[in-house]
Amino acid sequence: MSAPAAPPAMSTRATVKCDVLIVGAGIAGCATALMLTRRGKSVTLLERDQAGTRASAVNFGGVRQNGRDLRELPLAMRAREMWDHLPELIGLDGEFRATGNLRLASDEAREVQLAEFHQKAGALGLQLEMLDRPQLKARYPWLSDKPRLGVLCPSDGHANPRLVAPAFAGAAQEAGANLIEHAEVTEGWYSSGEFQLRVADGRTFAAPVLVNCAGAWAGKIAGWFDEPVTLVPEIPQVQVTEPLPYRIRPVLGFVGGDFYLRQTLRGSILFGSGQGRATADATRSRPLPETMRRGMEIAIDFIPGLAQVPVIRSWTGVDGDTVDGVCVLGQSETHPGLFHAFGFNGHGFLLGPAVGAVLRELICDGKTPTEIDELGIGRFRTPTTGSTSEQSNSLPPLRGKDAEA
């Protein structure tokens, strides 16, 4: 699919121009806007709904390097350093606490997988601690006997996405970014050295640089510029209990991603397992009772003390999964001035600040010190022809696997 050289119909409104256009005002898009405006760029940020209200705000709130695909680990490690300086970046700490992230394996195959991650991630500089079953029981007596092995990353933790996501949007605006909400992008093309976008009400915007941070809808935008990527909607479902005495300090995650849990500073237990349901266009979603029940069963299986604790509410959100479970980040291979940051597979909450920093460096300096070569959109090209084409539609089933962020 080729991007049209000119719009199919011209608008009578004047085109709004700037240095950089960004589509999508989640944390990644807003962090990019914030950092570019601080480098003196004029930025317009287009958001189909309200800034920071979709995946960036309704995720589980995990801030983790533990359990990441190794291709994302350099980006995750840079991001984690930035979380220590969140107040200087956006004016608040977002309730971030480095309580640790504990990955658990409950069968032999996952035990091998977890031990392999411990070895390989440790070799890349991530500080981890391996705990066998007796050590797990001694340190975390509220755990059942089911976990066979654990890997703890002490520097990981959790934060409140409902504070962090809007704060990035506010900081970007204060820095000078032009945030336009309720502006769904419906068309895009490249002409005379500029990317031009049209939104649903007919307004058009143009810039020599375009950043695609459109979340679950980013694959469509990439396709307008000859780089189509099929994204599978992910609908992670999270439940929350009534407040309890604070006891569960680390964030829990399971190898295979079938369960994740944390306790908030206020005492509520947040946990998730499985998927909710989305509308056909993936713009809205809702929880499913069977998913909630299954999550409760797993929670009790691993933490028996939760058996009598009431669950008071549940929610879902929509993210976009790539076929290989790893995000897309970097420069286009078809159009100079086009950059992508999407496909965060339900675990992009931690990455947002570093995504903004990397894109600022690529746009302003032409390079970044962070290793992102394996995150490029070119990995979805068809290797036999060397030209961009649709990737295979043979995709794995919907995953909730790292919806903990």
Image (cartoon, rainbow, N blue to C red):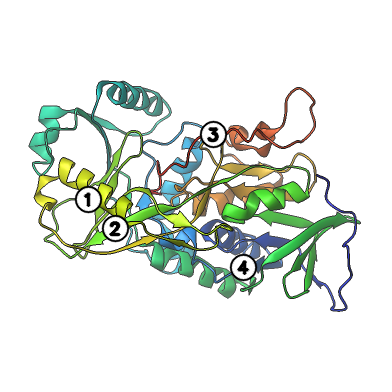
Q: Nearest the camera: 28 or 369?
A: 28
Q: CA distance from mark 3 to mark 2?
A: 27 Å
Binning the other alpha carbons within 10 Å of mark 1 as few (below 14), some (14 to 19) or many (20 upward) gives some
Q: Left or right of 206: which side holds 308? A: left
The residue that label 2 is drawn on is 239
Question: Helix, strand, or loop for circle 4?
Answer: loop
Pointers 1 and 2 in contact (C-beta within 8 Å): yes
Instruction: Identify the amino acid type marked 2.
Output: Gln
The percent coordinates of residue 50 (x first, y second) are 55, 72
Q: Please name the amino acid that badge 1 sits on.
A: Met
The residue wearing badge 3 is 324
Does the CB distance between marks 2 and 4 fall below 8 Å?
Answer: no
Of the two numbered discs 1 and 3 on the same chain, state the one appearing first in sequence. 1
- The residue indicated by pointer 1 is 296
Disc 3 residue type?
A: Asp
Residues under numbered marks 1 and 3 in contact, where contact means CB atoms less than 8 Å apart: no
In the rendered image of this protein, does residue 385 appear above or below residue 7?
above
Above-or-below relation of 251 to 68: below
- The image quarter in which residue 232 lies: top right
Which of the pair 67/145 is nearer the observer? Answer: 145
